[in-house]
Image (cartoon, coloured by chain):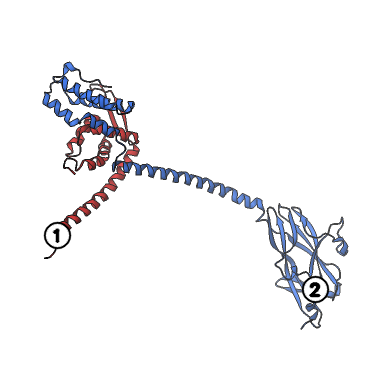
Amino acid sequence: MDQPGLLTELRRGVLGPAVLALLAERPRFGLELVRDLAAADGLLTSEGTVYPLLNRLRDNGLVTSEWRDEPGERPRRYYAITDAGGTYLERFRSEWAGFVTTVDGVLNKTATAASGPGEGA
Amino acid sequence: MTTMTTDQQLKQPKLLKEYLRELDRALQALPRSKARELREQITTHLDEAITPEMREDEVRAVLAELGQPVDLVADAAREPRVPNDIFVGRLRARRTRKRRWTIAGAVVGVLAVLAAVFVPLCITWSGVNADPVSIWGQRAVYGVSASDVTYSQANGETQTTIQLHPHTQQAMAYTFTNDTNYTQTILGFDPKDNFLGGGAFQLRFFTGPEIDVLAADTFDGAPPATVAPHHSRTMLLAWTTAKFPCFMAGGGAVLSGLRLRVHVGWVTRTENIRLPGALGLYGPSGTCPGR
């Protein structure tokens, strides 16, 4: 696998929960959400992928969106997490910790084996 | 909804126009509603991210960070992905399971409530818990002279003991009451009762207009015999000593109750109907055939 694509699938996998985590703090509009995600180094491969993801999250009932036209601001579509999204996020958080531990365990074990003493002469 | 920044406001309108043209071409691969939505999101993003003062390289950087239109559309057209959507799938499956359990729980709950209400009612209606008939009067009827009967006290009760006579039909009359709200029908002796059900005893019921307990022929009714709720009837327990010859050798038996099959409400059951006092049947001394 080439280096640029090394983490692509992994990023895709965690981007949804990351978006939900940000929306769990407060509702955000598109560009705001994109910039907050971009601030987390290495999480976004391209900013535009956030929008199809938001649409999927909404289709799955985890996110809602609404247009807000507030004084002094341009009209913006704000995204907010739903109750189902909150439940999903909590479950992801609890599963993620175990997942990371498992992957770490496998990676460290195989790394140790690979760097261990070679066969005798 | 926002509108795209106008060309006049931008120093680099050409870059943007090219990007949007490319986006529109790519969006043709999507269903119309999805395409419209994604275009609106992208144009809104650009509208906010690109300011009129931006230089070309800055606009290029914004567009590069946003991603190639064809990639964005490919991403939008992608089916639910692994592993993110595995969790969505799990969540849905969990919800479905939860919903099923909720429905199952509700059904069980309703059934439990119905059972809690109707089972006791059905039990009550069925007559299972109805009291058996109760015997309150007894009398030696025929084939039994006064000298054949002795009375004794045992456990606070009066035992009636009858001297058996060989090859003689004898009987006791019992008057009983059905104190329940159910019609009870006496079907006969419990077939499992080897003594009463062995053929030596008979049950006969009075069917005539007037009870004459001394007239055997007034008890011409055989089981089944129906006793209306809160009514009384008189029945005859008759026997012939020819059926238990060993009693004639000084043997005997004591009956404290009659085990009868009775139909009440929806059920048929065996009732152990207690006698007002024990009934002793004893034969004279002699030799038991076969001994």
SS for callout 2: helix
Relative to B231, say whether A83 is above or below.
above
Amino acid type of disc 2? Lys
Q: Amino acid at mark 1?
A: Gly
Which of B60 and B209 lies nearest the eye of the viewer? B60
Circle 1 residue: A116
Quick one: label 1, few (<14), some, or many (20+) residues within 10 Å? Answer: few
Q: Position of residue B191 (x, y in %)?
A: 72, 65
Crowding at mark 2 (Cα within 10 Å: few <14, some 14-19, many 20+): some
Q: Residue A31: x percent and y percent?
A: 22, 29
Mark 1 secondary-structure assignment:
loop
Chain shown red: that is A
Q: Looking at the image, which residue is at 85% across and 63% down?
A: B213
**Shade of chain B as shown in the rendered figure:** blue
- Indicate the quadrant where residue B151 lies: bottom right
Q: Nearer the viewer, residue B67 or B277?
A: B67
What chain does badge 2 belong to? B
Regarding residue B113, the answer to whether it shows in the image is yes
Name the side, left or right, on which B99 lies relative to A42: right
Residue B150, can we see it? no
Q: Chain of mark 1?
A: A
Q: Is residue A82 left or right of residue B10?
A: right
Residue B217 in percent (x, y) is at: 88, 62
Q: CA distance from mark 1 to mark 2?
A: 101 Å
Q: Is residue A2 left or right of residue B276?
A: left
Q: Which mark is residue B243?
A: 2
Q: Quadrant of residue B169?
A: bottom right
Which residue is drawn at the image coordinates 86% and 59% (left, top)? B211
Q: Is residue A108 above or below residue B13?
A: below
Q: Nearer the viewer, mark 1 or mark 2?
A: 1
Q: Quadrant of residue A35?
A: top left
Which sits in the foreground, A87 or B67?
B67
